[in-house]
Image (cartoon, rainbow, N blue to C red):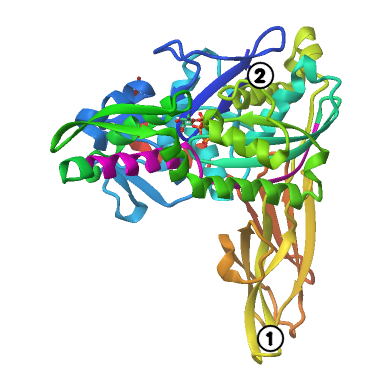
Amino acid sequence: MSKIIGIDLGTTYSAIAQLDDLGNPEVLSSTDSNRKITASAVYTNGDKVIVGDKALDALAATSKNVISETKRQMENDVAYSVAKGEWVEKDEAEEGSYTPAQVSSFILSKLKGYTNEVQKAVITVPALFAEKARVATLDAAKLAGIEVIELINEPTAAACYYASLPSVEKITGKVLVFDLGGGTFDVTLCEVIDQKVDVITSRGDKWLGGKDFDSEILNLVNEKYKAATGEGLDLENNRLKYMEVAEQIKRTLSVKDSHAEVIEGDKGPKKIEITRAEFEQSIQMHIEKLKMLMEECIDGSGCDTKEINHTLLVGGSTRIPIINKTIEKVMGKPPLKGVNVDEAVAAGAAIYAGLKSKDSLNAAQKKAIGKVQLKDVCNFYMGTLIQRDDPVLNRKVTHNMVVVERDTKLPAEETSTVVTVYDDQESISCSITQSEGREENREFVNLIHEGELVFPDKKPKGRQVEITYKYDTSGVMHCTFKDVSSEKKYEISLRPESAEDLKKQYETIEHIVIE
Ligand SMILES: Nc1ncnc2c1ncn2[C@@H]1O[C@H](COP(=O)(O)OP(=O)(O)OP(=O)(O)O)[C@@H](O)[C@H]1O
Ligand SMILES: [Mg+2]
């Protein structure tokens, strides 16, 4: 029988959890080591792929063959060129380059191997992951032979895990989930009542995480090496290797006030000392951003900080002392301790997978998680570009019109009507936009799809077209543009390509062995 599986596909570390016979989510250990998290790093030489910590071992000798931070590329049309050792525009990539979905599929395949009978899974994504990145994640799963039950947002999964804990059963109130990982920051406010999780709103930044802190440490190390030897480090060729060193320094500074490390550079080895105070100073700008997003999240919900009962910590970067201090300052009380910051997301995903497979749960599993419920929201404004007469400019201008509001509870279905602006107009453009703010200006929205509805006949201007956006609970949207008079439709589901199409696209990976 197919197991009940949740997967946290992280920027720096990934994890897979399964629901055990008693209904407890169990995060599985890597087959290479006893660790429950696997580095989201991939080594490839064209024939062989190595995933995890062992891939990082290859950094010193062949850093161009090591692919990391793939999650940050999921919404881009890029491919990793091993020859260049970087992500390049997909059109410019040589044959044998790897798309982000493909690299992610290697990581998923590796995780899948930690247990048998993995057919279906819930996979997590950042709350503010763009539509395109979600679809790329679904593509990656398909390539890895995993059927995705649903994609759920990482902080929502963590809240789901929190709500399942026996100690929480009687706790009622608002919980702020603070999720700071390796690549992304999400802050989500939800209400937990009798194990029912109701997401209220999320804010975040997909370019704010541990990797950015590593970069700041690397800058400090480089400056100090240069001051001591007269020459900086060769970051162009060895950046990933030095980023690993910087990460180790950062981890040590979470428990010590200073750390000295021997740095190997072109000018020989040099002992470099970094203090916690220097580190904290170097990430000050990121800290300000975190504070601002927390405040925006709380303000956006119409709540007061005092009404929030707990702050739940998720993600490895919440181990940094200054992060804890910052949360305490903003919230007026220390964050909740005791939930495993590395495992909560994968564990929550496994619980959610269980909730979605209720028919296959045994009595003990039903008892353990049966009362958990989840209601998520749409994290973006979803809209379309329309033409309107501008009386000031005295011409037609393109505007973004919102069809689904941010924070609308899922599942949702919204319909808006637009009209043609020219007599005998032959067609109407069917565009789908996404934005974090309520934008009218087309420059500030992300255009995620463009199509066209050609009218079967001619009519004077004012012809009505109904636009319906339907969001299922998995956060995948179905859009319909319907000409009201003829009922002719243009329909698009923002879903991944079929397995066959994907396979054709990725013929090259058929023979690859994943270790
Ligand atoms: N003790 C520590 N001190 C400081 N940072 C730490 C510590 N332990 C882990 N980290 C950092 O936490 C990050 C990894 O966290 P996590 O596994 O939650 O992220 P992720 O899931 O890979 O990323 P994301 O959720 O952003 O996609 C890394 O940047 C790592 O350096
Ligand atoms: Mg994470």
Residue found at the very far bottom of the displayed protein: 394
| Residue in the image at 75% along x and 52% along y | 300
The mark found on residue 436 in the picture is none
Judge by depth and name the residue closer to the eye, 399 or 333.
Answer: 333
Q: Place residue 504 in its image quadrant.
A: top left
| Residue in the image at 67% along x and 49% along y | 477
Q: Which of marks 1 and 2 is in front?
A: 2
Per the image, is 215 magenta?
A: yes
Residue 166: x %, y % from top left: 78, 15
Q: Is residue 180 visible?
A: no
Q: Do the residues labelled 1 and 2 touch (CB within 8 Å)?
A: no
Q: Distance from label 1 to label 2 (Cα)?
A: 57 Å
The stretch of residues the image draws in magenta is 197-225
| Residue in the image at 73% along x and 15% along y | 360
Q: Place residue 337 in its image quadrant.
A: top right
Judge by depth and name the residue closer to the eye, 69 or 327.
Answer: 327
Residue 256: x %, y % from top left: 44, 24
N-term-proximal mark, 1 vs 2: 2
Per the image, is 438 magenta?
A: no
Residue found at the very far left of the displayed protein: 267
Task: Tell me the residue that label 1 is attached to.
Answer: 390
Q: Place residue 55 in its image quadrant.
A: top left
Badge 2: how crowded within 10 Å, few (<14), some, or many (20+)?
few
Whether residue 421 is situated above or below residue 490 in the rendered picture:
below
| Residue in the image at 57% along x and 49% along y | 288
Q: What element carries label 1?
A: strand
Task: Tell me the residue that label 2 is attached to.
Answer: 338
Badge 1: how crowded within 10 Å, few (<14), some, or many (20+)?
few
